[in-house]
Amino acid sequence: MNIVSKKWGIALSCLLAFASMASTLYAVEVVAPSLSLKKTWIKTEDSYLLLTSVPVDAFTPTQVTCPGRGKCTVRIEVSSEFGFLKEPHVIQMKVLVDGVVANPGEWIYAQSTPLLEHAVRTFSWIQTNLTPGTHLVDVEFRVSGETAEAARRTLTIGVYKP
């Protein structure tokens, strides 16, 4: 076997190894380019919310409107103080738009290390291709086990169009 054949054999082996690894790794990217903000809804809540493994609404459900003709994209941002989380549990957040889980997905981990005091966490979701009209946005929190607490929190929803 000459040196060129040996190099190609090594290169092919590396390529096959990386290809097999790549088949198990994946990412889903949702893109919403060149949009203009049309409407904004903002809510704030200054109450303590006991979190258990049963999902609870972090805010009252919010009706948003996709104006005019054509599809809309909504961007939902949630900021909250979380506290009193015990090991090994995690605090999770989820956003639903018309009962459908918003992107990037279900039950985003907001906090996974123990908290004796409060710490603020922020995350954003988007939902694309909403039809003109009214849509319902719901934000839920839960903890994987035992209990934790959510305190002051803010919800910002922006409706965008091309």
Image (cartoon, rainbow, N blue to C red):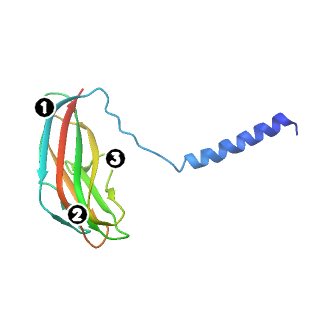
Q: CA distance from mark 3 to mark 2?
A: 18 Å
- Amino acid identity at mark 2: Pro
Residue 76 lies in quadrant: top left
- Per the rendering, the mark at residue 55 is 2
Give the residue drawn at x 88%, y 40%: 1
Quadrant location of the C terminus in the rendered image = top left
For numbered disc 3, what is the local secondary structure?
A: loop
Q: Nearer the viewer, mark 1 or mark 3?
A: 3
Residue 114 lies in quadrant: bottom left
State the residue in front, 137 or 152. Answer: 152
Residue 38 lies in quadrant: top left
Q: Position of residue 89 (x, y in %)?
A: 34, 68
Q: Position of residue 133 (x, y in %)?
A: 12, 37
For numbered disc 1, what is the local secondary structure?
A: loop
Q: Nearer the viewer, mark 1 or mark 2?
A: 2
State the residue in front, 40 or 63. Answer: 40
Q: Earlier in the sequence, mark 1 or mark 2?
A: 2
Q: CA distance from mark 1 to mark 2?
A: 31 Å
State the residue in front, 89 or 39. Answer: 89
Query: Is the Cβ of the residue at disc 3 closer than 8 Å to that at disc 2?
Result: no
Q: Which residue is mark 1?
A: 67
Give the residue drawn at x 17%, y 49%: 154
Q: Position of residue 6 (x, y in %)?
A: 81, 40
Q: Residue furthest front?
A: 117
- Amino acid identity at mark 1: Pro
Q: Which residue is mark 3?
A: 104
